[in-house]
Image (cartoon, rainbow, N blue to C red):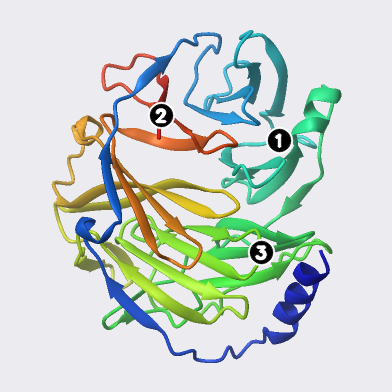
Amino acid sequence: MKQTSLMFFLFILSISCNKKTASNERDIFSRADFNEIDSLTSETVKFNKSLNPSSFNVVKDTIILSVDLKASNKCFIELFGIQSKKLLAKVAFKGRGPGEFLSCRVIYNNAEDAFIVHDYISHKFAEYAIDSILQNNKYFPKQIKLPTEVESLSKIDDGKFIVYNDMYIDNNKITNNVDEISLIDLSKDNTSSIVTGNEKFFPPNVNGAYVLVSPKKDKIFVVDHHDDNINIYNNQLNLIKSLKGPDQFQIEYQIIDNRRLSFKKDEYYRSYYPSYYTKDYIYLLYVGANRISSNIKKLDAKPVELFKLDWNGNLLHCYQLDKFLINISLDSNEQYLYGTVWHSDGKSPDLVKYKL
């Protein structure tokens, strides 16, 4: 605890408006660079208790967290026992009142005993302690407002978060000259902007990333949604390493109305889907949609891959899966991978698992 606190203290002291330019390296990698490659076959977990599920996470090994993006039961999230299938709790109720949400994005990793509900429409979030939910069905954690430019976030300490800026773009001559990530302190309801207001381009349709803060608070991974790129920062928010691969995307943009960015006509790119981390490892769900037709109706027929790395960015294991997953979670021993499979015919999604 003392060591973690010291590192975080140094981390806070080191951040200023003018960040230092750190020397960094860019590693180009392919699938052949992983230490191991395996193909895995899924097993469907029988579960049909949710009315209109959109996705599933398995939390604390014993609970299915079912997300309903339409909030059919007036709530976005229901928790069920993985063995009993019994409803344990409902949280994240839909509405505009106190403690309610207009949208729901769940952020969870098994290095935490809580999950975050990010309302990307009303720009606020709340952190739900899992044990508190199970003990109190009327548990409503405090909601915190976010700057409107925050596209994703990851907790680094109580009240303090690393956030991704949805105005960030830096591709050849197209740049807004803003930082990719920032540290914000929300303990005082700070909703100040993380942009200047002078950004030349409007890039939210073509950017986005997942922000992953290591349990030791010494590394920050920024995993791109569309480019097959992973940036690794230290605890001073200096870029120390970039990983580019495995397909080496070369994304082309077009500028509409002198400001709005989109992908080049009839092209679409998608690299990393919602990712997951544990105390020692990062698991990246990789789609690999590289310059495909913008008509992506058949994208969900393409099996995805899972990349296992450590917090230093070393490539450890490539798992080639047999299904198109839209999210992942792992058990506490990291022996089983769980994921959600969507069906193009409109049927309810399936919860599947793989033995790693």
Read off the residue under disc 1.
96
Which dot, 3 or 2, sits closer to the camera? Answer: 2
Q: Where's residue 203, x and y in %?
A: 38, 65
Q: Are marks 1 and 2 in contact (CB under 8 Å)?
A: no
Q: Would you say 45 lies left or right of 9 here?
A: left
Q: Amino acid at mark 2?
A: Lys
Q: Amino acid at mark 3?
A: Lys
Mark 1 element type: loop
Q: Secondary structure at mark 2?
A: strand
Mark 1 closeness class: few <14, some 14–19, many ≥20 residues within 10 Å: few
Q: Position of residue 21 (x, y in %)?
A: 50, 91
Label 3 residue SS? loop
Residues packed near mark 2 inside 10 Å, few (<14), some (14 to 19) or many (20 plus) = few
Q: Earlier in the sequence, mark 3 or mark 1?
A: 1
**Of label 1 and label 2, which has the lower sequence position?**
1
Of circles 3 and 1, which is in front?
3
Q: State the residue in front, 210 or 344.
A: 210
Does 76 appear above or below 107? above
> Which quarter of the rendering shows the N terminus?
bottom right
Does residue 344 lie above or below 20 as drawn?
Answer: above
Q: Which mark is residue 355?
A: 2
- Give coordinates of residue 199: x percent, y percent: 45, 78
The residue where tag 3 is placed is 216
Residue at position x 62%, y 36% in the image: 102
